[in-house]
Amino acid sequence: PELRIVIIEGGFAWVPSFAWRMDRSWKRLKAEVPFLKKAPSEYILEHFWFTSQPMEEPRQPRHFEQILEHLDGGSRLMFATDYPHWDFDSPDRALPGTLPFEVRRNIMSENARQFYRLA
């Protein structure tokens, strides 16, 4: 119940559609997994965090914000740069400029501080 997992360098744009597919299958096959008391998407939001590298930025900023909504408003996303590799994400250009300051700050520092219990 207390397990916390970070998916590093796996991206995060795939998470909403993955969670949706898992929930859909769970609803159809609940009898097969009676020990699952909640939808898979709820377990994902409770136990999984993701890093921003590689950054998967849609063409439309609003689509990026929709992805963050599925990740609990971005509270499950932590910044990662992948430095010193040649294709690293620069901290000053990694996130869309349209993100509110608070969301940007959480992704860039606060989420990791909370996850690693540094806050």
Image (tube, rainbow, N blue to C red):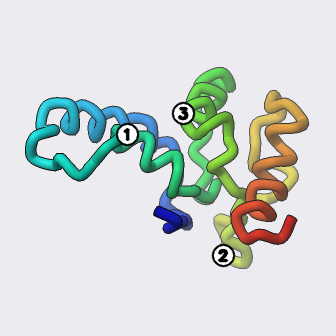
Q: Does 74 appear above or below 109?
A: above
Q: Which mark is residue 58?
A: none
Q: How many marks?
A: 3
**Residue with the mark numbered 1:** 19
Q: Does 20 appear above or below 83?
A: above
Q: Is residue 8 visible?
A: yes
**Residue with the mark numbered 3:** 70
Count neighbours of disc 2 (C-alpha within 10 A) and say few if under 14, some if 14 to 19, many if 20 or more: few
Q: Is residue 18 visible?
A: no
Residue 85 drawn at (x, y percent): 66, 75
What residue sits 69% from the left and 56% below the top?
78
For the residues labelled 3 and 2, say whether their Cβ atoms are less than 8 Å apart.
no
CA gap between label 3 and label 2 equals 29 Å
Left or right, residue 28 beside residue 79:
left
Name the one closer to the observer, 19 or 91. 19
Name the one closer to the observer, 78 or 31. 31
What residue sits 52% from the left and 56% below the top?
48
**Residue type indicated by callout 2:** His
CA gap between label 2 and label 1 equals 30 Å
**Residue type indicated by callout 3:** His
What residue sits 23% from the left and 52% below the top?
35
For the residues labelled 2 and 1, say whether their Cβ atoms are less than 8 Å apart.
no
Name the one closer to the observer, 21 or 10. 21
Q: Which residue reaches farthest bottom?
A: 84
Q: Which mark is residue 85?
A: 2
